[in-house]
Amino acid sequence: VETELARLDSVPKPGIQKGMSFEEYTRIDAANHSKLEGFKRTPAHAREIILRGREDTEALKTGHALHLALLEPDRFEVEFALGPQGDKRTKAVKNAWAEFEVTHPHATLLDPEEYDAIIGMRASILRHPMAAELLSGKGMNELSLVWQDDETERFCKSRLDRVTVLLGEALIVEVKTAKDASEREFQKAV
């Protein structure tokens, strides 16, 4: 009983959590998509994701960087850093990267091509009139939701990229990246 009460103390009151940082969100003891995703394969896979997290891939790094660049630019500047330019095979550039890694211990380092790609994608998205309106107009980014599932009585959580209004309609906007932007492949990726 004490363990369950302690767990309940770590879950905010159900509802919309405005202004909650991502770090606070991750500490909420509740089921979410990331935790449940492993069950697509086996319960053992789900357990590994819960205990160790997902393996970072280049695609996940790019998606996360673009997400922050669009929705949380201040956080992007803290979590990602543009590394030294030049051929990484040369001693001077290798040394510059080694020094850069020491001076930016908590940042994900991007080489110039990666950084330029992220900034270019952000600029391209914001040049599109509807995308610019959805991402820059009236609204709120990174809203956390907490609720208790009626059937299981388990607490659940989710984080919405953005809630906005367009033409008088309330909308939830989710930023997603995919290798292939054709309708069929993008639907599969999302």
Image (cartoon, helix red, strand yellow):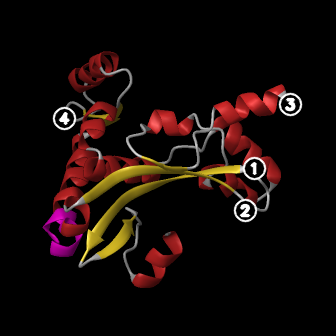
- Examine the image and state in which quarter residue 133 appears: bottom left
Mark 4 and mark 3: Cα distance apart in space: 59 Å
Q: Position of residue 108 (x, y in %)?
A: 37, 34
Determine which residue is flagged by label 1.
45
**What residue span does the magenta drawing correspond to?**
124-132
Determine which residue is flagged by label 2.
40
Q: Is residue 100 magenta?
A: no
Determine which residue is flagged by label 3.
1
Q: In the image, what residue occupies the spot 67% across and 44% down?
A: 49
Mark 4 crowdedness (10 Å alpha carbons): few <14, some 14-19, many ≥20: some
Up/down of 82 relative to 145, above or below:
above
Q: Position of residue 165 (x, y in %)?
A: 28, 69
Residue 183 located left or right of residue 98 = right
User: Residue 86 — which label?
Assistant: 4
Of callouts 2 and 1, the N-terminal one? 2
Mark 3 and mark 1: Cα distance apart in space: 28 Å
- Tags 4 and 1 touching, CB below 8 Å: no
Nearer the observer: mark 4 or 1; the answer is 1
Q: Secondary structure at mark 1?
A: helix
- Examine the image and state in which quarter residue 96 appears: top left
Nearer the observer: mark 2 or 3; the answer is 3
- Tags 2 and 1 touching, CB below 8 Å: yes
Q: Secondary structure at mark 4?
A: loop
For the residue marked with disc 3, what is the amino acid? Val
Quarter the N terminus occupies: top right
Magenta span: chief secondary structure = helix
Nearer the observer: mark 2 or 4; the answer is 2
Looking at this view, is 18 or 30 the one in front?
18
